[in-house]
Image: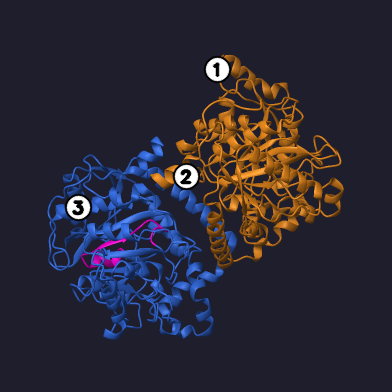
Chain colours: A orange, B blue
């Protein structure tokens, strides 16, 4: 944590609830944690950089809405500085350890948010995700991490990483909780230039039982960084989706991986640089050396480089969209394999990069993704997969994730297990239907 | 013209038609002209720069499709070099004069394409449009110019101006012809990375009679560059839409004009520069001085400048979208006032810029637009308006343009006049309905 709200700071939220006395509010009294690059009125926002800190007068749109719905903010959580990292160690506020095994990191950059939910301090937490920051810490801590379609959950009041790519994310114990929160929070925000309207077919009624025969892509070749245990766990996850009635379709993941390379080996670094350039000029020592190293490439890129990269991305996206055609979703491991704190200390950049192999491409390609717990490895560490699909299929992906969790029968954080089956309507990928049939 | 197909060059297309003997082809035997930045197999593509010329083996996707549908290419037409200009004088192949008054330019950059249709050499023509190049020459020559939603008509095989913004356009005598062609040519093209699927609600069935009570935006303040005649003609156009049953809604055009500034005063120039940078290095004299002057600003922009401009555009687009909310379309003059050839000679940049005031913002904002003839000024020069709306409302805009033409009773190029009313189904802006109601 960077800031735990004390009794005085929490009081107005409790009083507000007392005053409204409206116990029908959907989030009445539910404690939630806020990543410290998201504004909470009156509490400093640090982005894990004390020299950058400011105290906002207003909460971020998404935080304000949660409070209006009855939620109680309990803490501002630690993160990889400026949300640049996937491991949780890049913070002057301390290394964030894994909630289960202390030799492992929490994952990041939404490190504290994940741990807060995993340890029961909060019922859910807000994170952000530009390249995996909401999904990697979910996978490391037995949580669901929803990186919804860009623009559906407001980023107004969030410190940008890459403004064109940033998403506000949800960290929850279960996919059904994420679905409920998503339906409450996916609102057009006029204050957010990147806000998009959520179409009706992606509303709460789109969440339900999955239909048999859904087609999920499975990459033909995957890199588990040499670990056979991860490979076996992934095969188990594929088999589980088949048990659920899904049809595995082999796909070529290489265009997706090509997109990922653009993010850190191309001019998008200039976006991150824009956020901190004043501070970088004024007081470079205020920024962690590892973050400065990432940003160093930025000033070299020209607008022409940028356009070349944009064309390349558009070409890759056309290839990826062609792969996605006829698929309901794609299944990948959340990461090639978990890395340890020792490995991160030894190779802070390479070990971090390894974590992002299956997450980096998502935001650039404008896909929606859910990280969902799939197993525990032999040493007890949580192990997760990612289910992703086209933009505006969030509720459909969550339906698959929900069924996946119920079929796995794994304990959620806090110990609860889900009922094996959920009754109710069949979830449908309505977007495909509407696009095809008008 | 840059190249008129001789008998030998036209023969294969005629033979092909003879061979298929399929008189049911929708474009059977119809002659069409092709702007010389669009590939026609076996004929050089010059982009009005002889040093840039190459002879393509394959036709552009859109040209190939027209030929498959029975069309006969008759000429490659003159243009402002590299489609950079709105007047038709910037070409080593000669100044393109107006089809009605020789003291005026044709408008550009699709100059020869407009004149070819206006003079009856072709039944319709292909142009391109990045900042008005398909609409300005339409307005100058009593034509309809459709700049459809970006990505709906393939740009594969088109020399780029700004690849992220370019559109292939249609120049026709009437909006109903443009509607028919659009429905035939708006096809997803896997070879075009920027291709988008046309939703069913924007198909041919969306074209028809307009419904009463449609709301059209009218800018509260407009710049007619001091000419009261243009102002009166615009008032007449507003009155005509009201006669048609429309409701005029005053709007603030300033955010739209802010977007326009970004196009030439920002890093998008770097896109144009990318297209010709090799030639510019190898043989700068091969490029017209006025075009070189435009491109000179490009190397100064960095990727960070680019992102700043992208954020600014996104902010402006959010403002413009808010203005568009609840409107069916917006009406503007096609240009503040027509400029003469003498003015262009005296002030080649300023006079050209004046032409683009009401067209430059469209592609950046991802709107669809139709230039439609509205009147003749006292000296006999055609005078047009632009009707624009949100992406994927092309057929709806064409329905309004069609009714506008029928109500005006003006002679089309070639002398025909349209029946005052068209029977058939009522056109509806289905997009709005689907987005709202699912």
- Cα distance between the residues tagged 1 and 3: 53 Å
Front one among B162 and A36: B162
Q: Position of residue B70 (x, y in %)?
A: 28, 69
Front one among B292 and A399: A399
Quadrant of the rendering where the N terminus of chain A is positioned:
top right
Residue matched to label 2: A432
Magenta region, residue range: B135-153
Q: Residues within 10 Å of mark 3 (few under 14, many from 20)?
A: many
Q: Residues within 10 Å of mark 1 (few under 14, many from 20)?
A: few
In the rendered structure, the answer to whether residue B164 lies left or right of residue B133 reads right
Was residue A58 drawn as part of the magenta stretch in this picture? no
User: Element under label 1?
Assistant: loop
- Cα distance between the residues tagged 1 and 2: 35 Å
Q: Position of residue B170 (x, y in %)?
A: 30, 64
Chain of the residue under label 2: A
Evaluate whether residue B296 shows in this view: no
In the rendered structure, the answer to whether residue A431 lies left or right of residue A219 reads left
Was residue B143 drawn as part of the magenta stretch in this picture? yes
Q: Nearer the viewer, mark 1 or mark 2?
A: 2
Residue matched to label 3: B404
> Is A339 placed above or below B386 here?
above
> Is B46 placed above or below A234 here?
below
């Amino acid at each position: 944590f960077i800031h735990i709200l004390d009794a005085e700071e929490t009081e107005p939220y409790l009083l507000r609830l007392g005053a409204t006395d409206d116990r029908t509010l959907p989030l009445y009294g539910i404690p939630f944690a806020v990543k410290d690059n998201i504004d909470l009125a009156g509490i400093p926002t640090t982005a894990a950089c004390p020299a950058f800190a400011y105290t906002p007068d207003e909460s971020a749109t998404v935080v304000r809405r949660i409070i209006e719905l009855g939620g109680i903010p309990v803490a501002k959580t630690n993160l990889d500085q400026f949300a640049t990292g996937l491991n949780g160690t890049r913070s002057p506020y301390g290394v964030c350890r894994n909630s289960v095994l202390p030799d492992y990191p929490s994952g990041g950059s939404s490190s504290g948010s994940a741990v807060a939910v995993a340890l029961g301090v909060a019922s859910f937490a807000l994170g952000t995700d530009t390249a995996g920051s909401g999904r990697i810490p979910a996978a490391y801590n037995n949580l669901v991490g929803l990186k919804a379609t860009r623009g559906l959950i407001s980023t107004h009041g969030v410190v940008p990483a890459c403004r064109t790519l940033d998403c506000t994310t949800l960290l929850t114990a279960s996919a059904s909780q994420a679905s409920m929160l998503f339906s409450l929070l996916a609102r057009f925000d006029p204050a957010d230039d990147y806000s998009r309207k959520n179409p009706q077919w992606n509303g709460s009624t789109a969440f339900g039982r999955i239909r048999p025969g859904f087609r999920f892509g499975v990459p033909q070749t995957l890199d588990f960084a040499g670990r056979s245990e991860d490979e076996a766990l992934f095969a188990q996850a594929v088999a589980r989706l088949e048990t659920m009635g899904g049809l595995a379709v082999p796909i070529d993941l290489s265009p997706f991986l090509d997109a990922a390379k653009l993010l850190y080996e191309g001019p998008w670094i200039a976006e991150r640089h824009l956020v901190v350039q004043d501070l970088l000029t004024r007081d470079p020592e205020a920024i962690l050396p590892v973050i400065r190293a990432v940003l160093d490439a930025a000033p070299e890129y020209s607008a022409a480089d940028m356009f070349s990269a944009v064309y390349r991305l558009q070409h890759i996206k056309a290839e990826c969209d062609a792969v996605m055609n006829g698929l309901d979703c794609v299944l990948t491991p959340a990461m090639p394999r978990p890395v340890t704190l020792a490995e991160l200390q030894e190779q802070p950049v390479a070990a971090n990069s390894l974590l992002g192999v299956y997450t980096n491409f998502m935001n650039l390609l404008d896909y929606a993704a859910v990280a969902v717990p799939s197993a525990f490895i032999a040493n007890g560490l949580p192990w997760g997969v990612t289910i992703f699909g086209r933009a505006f299929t969030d509720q459909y992906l969550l339906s698959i994730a929900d069924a996946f969790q119920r079929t796995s029968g794994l304990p959620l954080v806090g110990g609860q297990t889900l009922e094996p089956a959920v009754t109710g309507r069949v979830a449908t990928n309505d977007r495909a239907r509407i696009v095809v049939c008008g």
